Image (tube, helix red, strand yellow):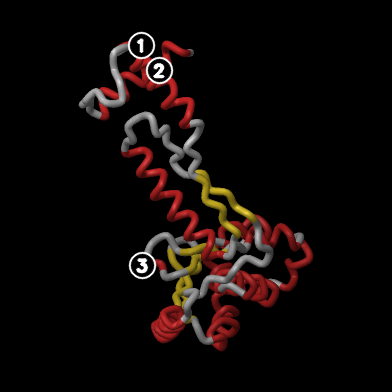
Amino acid sequence: MKLRHMIQKHCITAFHQAFPAYVSKIELSDLNSIIEVTEARQEKFGHYQCNAAMKLTKYLELPARSIAQALKEKLDGLLFPAGPFGDIQIAGPGFINVSLSTDYLTKALHALQTDPRLGVDSIKSKQRVVVDFSSPNIAKEMHVGHLRSTILGDALCRLLSFLGYDVLRLNHLGDWGTQFGMLIAYIHRQMPGLTPETPLSVSLTELVTWYRAAKQCFD
């Protein structure tokens, strides 16, 4: 179970213990959405944050900070025996901030360092994923967009393969026979005396210009 889910479970238990008379007044599905635990947005607020106290005021008709204090007193007994937690603080109108202990973080990082999978689980059911790369038109100049999509595609493939997906890499070059056929036919039209033995020096930019003209002509 992830730490966030474990904290949420303990927060719900703390609510049951702190306010038993109100438990029956709130549906379980509503309680799961009210007592929500998220990662803290700022480092000074610890690692996890629960803002349930403010949401519970309309059900309990009590100040949010009083609700947060009651939940904290129960959480102190629920969380700290579990080991990873270092501190629970109430901030502002009733935010409950939970921090992990330095000892726990040190051990967790060491475990990740020695784990070949870095703590990442493989997917349970292996699925086929197709990643379409840059698929350039090889009769035209390539540009940074082709390079960018190829690098991003490769990064995605590595990530998906690591997670356990069956990854198929595709880099479709299209009907290059038609492309170069049009280019050759167009050159013959423009330079009818040209033979395979005739020296011809053109830049790639000039070839692209001819290709565009050829495509327009034959379209």
* Residue type, label 3: Lys
**185, 150: nearer the viewer:** 185
Q: Which residue is mark 1?
A: 189
Position of 6 with respect to 191 (left or right) is right
The picture places residue 111, in percent across and down from the top left corner, at 46, 83
The picture places residue 70, in percent across and down from the top left corner, at 58, 74
Q: Nearer the viewer, mark 2 or mark 3?
A: 2
Q: Secondary structure at mark 3?
A: helix
Q: Nearer the viewer, mark 1 or mark 3?
A: 1
Residue 165 sits in quarter: bottom right
Q: Where the N terminus falls, by quadrant? A: bottom right
Q: Which residue is mark 2?
A: 185
* Residue type, label 1: Arg
Using the image, determine if residue 97 lies above or below residue 129.
Answer: below
Pick out the residue farthest to the right: 24
Q: Residue at x 29, y 17 (%)?
A: 194
